[in-house]
Amino acid sequence: MAERSQTAPEAGNDMGNDDAIGGNVSKYIVLPTGYCGQPKKGHLIFDACFESGNLGRVDHVSEFEYDLFIRPDTCNPRFRVWFNFTVENVKESQVRKIVDTFRAVLRVIFNIVNFSKTKSLYRDGMAPMVKSTSRPKWQRLPPKNVYYYRCPDHRKNYVMSFAFCFDREEDIYQFAYCYPYTYTRFQHYLDSLQKRNMDYFFREQLGQSVQQRQLDLLTITSPEDKSDLENSVMQKKIKIPKLSLNHVEEDGEVKDYGEEDLQLRHIKRPEGRKPSEVAHKSIEAVVARLEKQNGLSLGHNTCPEEVFVEASPGTEDMDSLEDAVVPRALYEELLRNYQQQQEEMRHLQQELERTRRQLVQQAKKLKEYGTLVSEMKELRDLNRRLQDVLLLRLGSDNLREGAERKVVFITGRVHPGETPSSFVCQGIIDFLVSQHPIARVLREYLVFKIAPMLNPDGVYLGNYRCSLMGFDLNRHWLDPSPWAHPTLHGVKQLIIQMYNDPKTSLEFYIDIHAHSTMMNGFMYGNIFEDEERFQRQAIFPKLLCQNAEDFSYSSTSFNRDAVKAGTGRRFLGGLLDHTSYCYTLEVSFYSYIVSGTTAAVPYTEEAYMKLGRNVARTFLDYYRLNSMVEKVAIPMPRLRATEERSSGGEPPSCLRTWSEPEALGTSMTTGCEPASIGTVTSHGIWNVLALPYLLDSSPTPSVVHPT
């Protein structure tokens, strides 16, 4: 990055021009006006050149005050909300003595002077996030130290000012708009899930972004009926070589092999043993020479000793004795070679026998394994039939062979600065891949398709709303470009493909966002001319409100705004049929208000993920699968008599925890159990006849009709 001027501008001048901001600051040392020496302790160093970082400019106002400028989204100067930067080289300054051991430290004021939004939760108590190297956990600043106002000194832009005390000189402090959730963290999270080798979790790359970052698609469901183990090995006759024992005597001696047997059972010698090979090849020549000299014939019935005796020369012919010395040496070599061959043949015969016995044992094991595989297949078929019977009794037909697979499609992080959506999405994923009984039932009944990060480039770059090329992807669902909006184009093509598949029923599409001006979690829905369909889509938000204490049904609205025509909710709501429901799930950047109270409870990372778990749990209520959890997922063990008496016939708490809504952090009131609200059709969905009671039981959501 180009070196910035070290001279601070005069206060009140027109330095708020965002045209001068071209990138993030990189280890930028802010020096006082007129200072020419080397930087020293207390000259703050700002840095935002890291993943998801955003800080475009720093102006020095005084030693205790700095004006900060948010870098606009790449190729789009309209959006300036997200910030994420570090400060180091701080100095702990003693201001005044209070008591003996207490002291007040230096407070530095940071003014973020170019917010693009007029409304903000900073007016309602929201505060920036901060952490340091010695305290790595994110926490919010005290709201009393945060101010949000319109400033005439900065072109009447809205300014957020906050005061902070640096208490440790060696620490590096990091400030952010909300809890950061980077692309790298997301990839590490998916890698950890993939390493668990869960057969109901599948990760694939649906496409790539403009900067070649991958668009991940997760599929979470019970594995399809895998093809049975190939029985070709067991069906075919296993040919086990049977060794002939005709040549083996009871005492272990090897009989004389014929010439043909010797050729078949011969072991090739390595090339290095050339002398032995030469000796073997010269056997016939030696025998011929002996026969010529001694007039003897080496037949099969002639012993080697006899040949040697008969071939020995007489004392009367000394010349013949000297001539017989050479044949005798060659014959001894021939004898040694023959004995070595006999020994090697004996070892080979024993080795082959051991191999045959091992093959016989393996064949027996394969036969037993084949029997076990057949029994397991029969048990799986029986279990499948039992599930079909139970589901028929429960009014659900999704698991029957030939039935449509019910699909829930979830997307997140289409706006990169809305980091809470990633935490909510992770909460959904963590719950669905867990061994919780509800998660098991949901995996059996539904197919979850999740694209947790639709805008990986914007997330990496630290944008708030746009992609690398400056596009708000959530306004381009009508006609996404494969080169300008490749991730959106890939997701849309997949959804259309599933919609056209007769074996797939796309029943839900939920796009997760974060809201910068409202509290709680809530939903946006569509308006339909069909009154029954319009009322039916209100069921899921109502059930979610019962399960999640931070979800507000009264804040949920259904609209048909023209400015949101290009959103996923609006486009897919008009594309899909009457059995599909499309929502935008919003969650506050700041806090939620529990029903019956007025105090705002700030969101934490865990609270966001808890909302995600409750979203997943609500599908159990929507499809009326509670009985399946109780009767199928966990059979109740038989209690001892003492336990039955102590619990009054109720199961112990350790076995009842999973079935209680509080196990998921829910807050359900008496009489609001989903089973008591209405009836279900033969397809397992809610009957619209029960809706009047459902809608009247709580504040009516706002409905915005088209103008």
Image (spheres, helix red, strand yellow):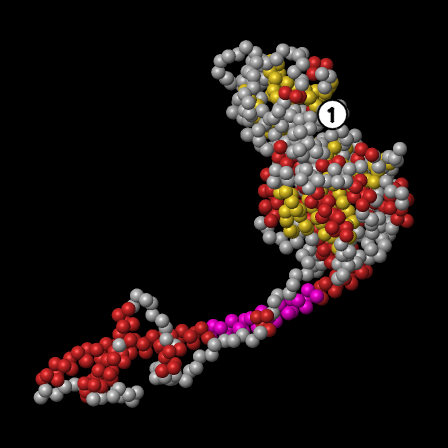
Quadrant holding the C terminus:
top right
Residue type indicated by callout 1: Lys
In the rendered image, the vertical position of residue 532 relative to residue 134, given as above or below: below
The structure residue drawn at horizontal position 35% and vertical position 77%, both measured from the top left corner, is 345
* x and y, in percent, of residue 634 in the image: 71, 56
Report whether residue 64 is seen: no
Can residue 375 be found in the magenta stretch?
Answer: yes
Residue that mark 1 sits on: 117
* x and y, in percent, of residue 633 in the image: 72, 56
The structure residue drawn at horizontal position 74% and vertical position 51%, both measured from the top left corner, is 498
Q: Could you say which quadrant of the image residue 47 lies in?
A: top right
In the rendered image, the vertical position of residue 460 relative to residue 55, given as above or below: below
Q: Is residue 66 left or right of residue 681?
A: left
Q: Is residue 654 left or right of residue 171?
A: right
Rate crowding at label 1 as few (under 14), some (14 to 19) or many (20 or more) other CA atoms within 10 Å. some
In the rendered image, the vertical position of residue 219 relative to residue 286, given as above or below: above
Front in this rendered view, residue 182 or 127: 182
Can residue 612 be found in the magenta stretch?
Answer: no
The structure residue drawn at horizontal position 84% and vertical position 48%, both measured from the top left corner, is 578
Give the residues in magenta: 357-381
* x and y, in percent, of residue 541 in the image: 81, 42
Secondary structure, magenta segment, majority class: helix
Front in this rendered view, residue 70 or 660: 70
